[in-house]
Image (cartoon, rainbow, N blue to C red):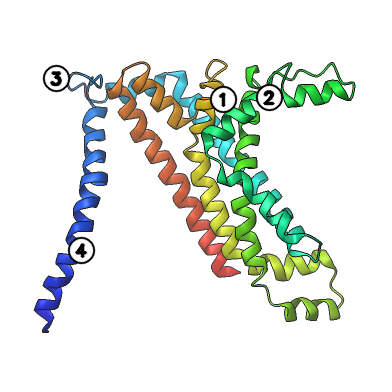
Amino acid sequence: MNSAVMKKTMYIFVLPALLFYCVFWIFPILKLFQYSVSDYNGYVQQFNYVGLDNYMALFKADILGVAIKNTLIYTVITVVLGNVIALMIALLLNANIRSKGFYRSAFYIPTLFSAIVVGFIWSYIYMPQEGLIASFLAMIGIQNIDTNFLGSFTKALYAIIAVDIWKNIGTSTIIFLAGLQMVPHDLLEAGKIDGAGKWKLFRFITLPLLATSVTINITLSVINGLKAFDYPFIMTGGGPGISTNTLIFAMYEMAFTDQMFGKASAFGIISFAVIIAITAVCVFTLNRKEVAA
């Protein structure tokens, strides 16, 4: 088979994937741009073009700033706290302990449940009077603590973040465990012979060799945090007020509750730009760190 025929064959095989990509990715993005400069309401196909009015209105409104702030808080805490806890658990599970397989399974089980199931379970756990937390505190004699976590303007977002970390920590732990099992024991033994303690062994041998696992987990955590929608939707409905509104939730509410698809499309473009920018910076930085390690 000559090269011309091989090229034609290659293009034929690539064409279905390219068509799928254009129909389900490129076309929706172009339509999103179109709707973002219109007064489209999602129902009537006749709409007027309003230029950049939707973007200007969003930048003047409080909702965009609140949604960006909440999303960044959500992302930073889930990335930092989630990965630190997952790494600590992975180090413990990688040690010589009894029933290691049981503990590994136990920590991974929450990841098997859907977000809807987890959201409803934790909504009951967080209930002010009859919930598990309130009942436990009452049982040990603590009565003066406000347990209305989901009804608090200051606590609701952090209560949701805790649920997200609990749900996804198993995946991060498994990835760290896989990385830990690739660390050569000879290097650790050589470090011990040279007099290095546990902290130095971790800091100068284990952690640099976990660079790939760290990159994977942080990237996944950043993406998960920036697209946070499930738990604010299920557990608080974005409330109280707009205290748990994230970028994706605010866009959803603007489109399907307020029926302002044009403005929601503009919100989507802004959200897309913010998410792409943050993810690109994180991936670029982590890749440089990984190469340096």
Is the C-beta separation of discs 1 and 3 under 8 Å?
Answer: no
| SS at circle 1 | helix
Mark 2 and mark 1 in contact? Answer it, CB < 8 Å. Answer: yes
- Give the mark nearer the N terminus: 1 vs 3: 3
Q: Mark 4 points at which residue?
A: 14
Residue 106 in the image, given as x and y percentages of width and height: 69, 50
Label 1 sits on residue: 235
Mark 1 nearby-residue class (10 Å; few <14, some 14–19, many ≥20):
many
Marks 3 and 4: in contact by CB < 8 Å? no
Q: Which of marks 1 and 4 is nearer the N terminus?
A: 4
Q: What residue type is labelled 2?
A: Tyr
Q: Which of 127 and 54 is in front in this view?
A: 127
Q: How far apart are marks 1 and 4 (CA)?
A: 43 Å
What residue sits 83% from the left and 24% below the top? 137
Label 3 crowd (10 A; few <14 / some 14-19 / many >=20): few
> What residue is shown with label 2?
126
Residue 114 vs residue 148, the one in the foreground: 114
Cα gap from disc 3 to disc 2, whole angstroms = 46 Å
Task: Tell me the element at label 2.
Answer: loop
In this view, the mark in front (2 or 4): 2
